[in-house]
Image: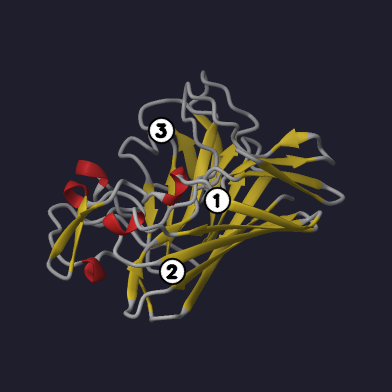
Amino acid sequence: MELFTLTNRSLRVTISTEGAEMQSIYDTVSEREVMWQGDPKYWGGRSPVLFPAVGGLWNGVFHYEGRTYKMPKHGFVRAKTWKGTQYTPARARFEYMSTADDMKSFPFPFRVTIDYSLWNRKVRAKFYVDNYSDKPMFFQMGGHPALNLPDFNENEVENGYVKFIGKPTHILRAREQGCLQPEHFDVPLNGEGLLPVSVATFANEAIILEKSEVKGLILLDTQRRPVATVYSTAPCWLIWSMQGVHCPYVCFEPWYGLPDYEGFDGPLNMRPYVQRLGSRRMWEGGYTIEIP
């Protein structure tokens, strides 16, 4: 594993070549760590990159052109070693090129690139996918950054709040095998129009948003002061913390895709919010984290 460090006047960001995963966002002005540090007592991740699938696949497989392929939850690039290149003190690029072995799980040759950069008090993660196949490629991609809760107290019911940039009309829930239930549910907001970060909020796993109704999420501390904001063009978002446990973090996850619905047995191109990329084409996405 090799670590790359980006710096500017107010932020220091560390990224690993293992999974091209951000390890730290340190605010050098306030001297505080913004990103969750992966304590395995709760959850060992920090900011995994999800590709070529997000969430669960029904029975752990997908179907394409008459064949069945096994795919782990959230895809496989988060477990791969990427090639990193640092261009400036505030910008680095990480690339993963598919292998012949990868074709056993995902039948398209590809390259995934993530460009991390600092702009004042913003961390930008830009995603690029190149399709080297002679036919369209179907895939999903997502970010999974976890943010520290600065006022965490396991004896308190609520340890922070989430404010939406946008007006979600409903949420979805995942249940069996991490796959979606067909029903829509009300957004569990409090009287202030905020989503509490609490065990009750995540009693049914993640809060799942869709249809591009949300453009970003703002994490507030217990005094309703902004901690960090995550923006993205992604059509779907997950807000996640471990089910049934008071946790010192919350994940704001912009996803270009969603898990299968329970019982789904259709082809790859019918998975929820799947991305279609033409032959020899490039796809772009990503997200930005802003520190107030």
Residue drawn at 33 percent across, 35 percent down: 203
- Find residue 290 and report its horizontal and vertical position in percent: 69, 54
Work out which residue is located at the far front of the displayed protein and give it: 100
Badge 1 is on which residue?
Answer: 82
Given residues 108 and 56, the one toward you in this image is: 108
**Label located before the other in sequence (2 or 3):** 2
Relative placement, left or right, of 163 versus 178 is: right
Q: Pointer 3: what residue?
A: 242
- Indicate the position of residue 275 as horizontal and vertical percent values: 37, 71
Residue 243 lies left or right of residue 60; in this view the side is: right
Among numbered discs 3 and 1, the one appearing first in the sequence: 1
Q: Nearer the viewer, mark 3 or mark 1?
A: 1
Of circles 1 and 2, which is in front?
1
Q: Quadrant where the N terminus lies?
A: top right
Crowd class of label 3 (few under 14; some 14 to 19; many from 20; radius 10 Å):
some
Relative vertical location of residue 137 with respect to residue 155 in this rendering, above or below = below
Q: Is residue 96 above or below residue 64?
A: above
- The answer to whether residue 245 is seen in the rendering is yes
Mark 1, other Cα within 10 Å: few <14 / some 14–19 / many ≥20:
many
**Disc 2 element:** loop
Is 95 in front, or is 158? Answer: 95
At x 65%, y 48%, the residue is 228
Task: Identify the residue at the far right of this view.
Answer: 9
Q: CA distance from mark 3 to mark 1?
A: 28 Å
Residue nearest the observer in this picture, 14 or 165? 14
Element type at marker 3? loop
- Residue 201, compared with residue 142, is above or below; it is above
Q: Quadrant of residue 232?
A: bottom right
Residue at the disc numbered 2: 212
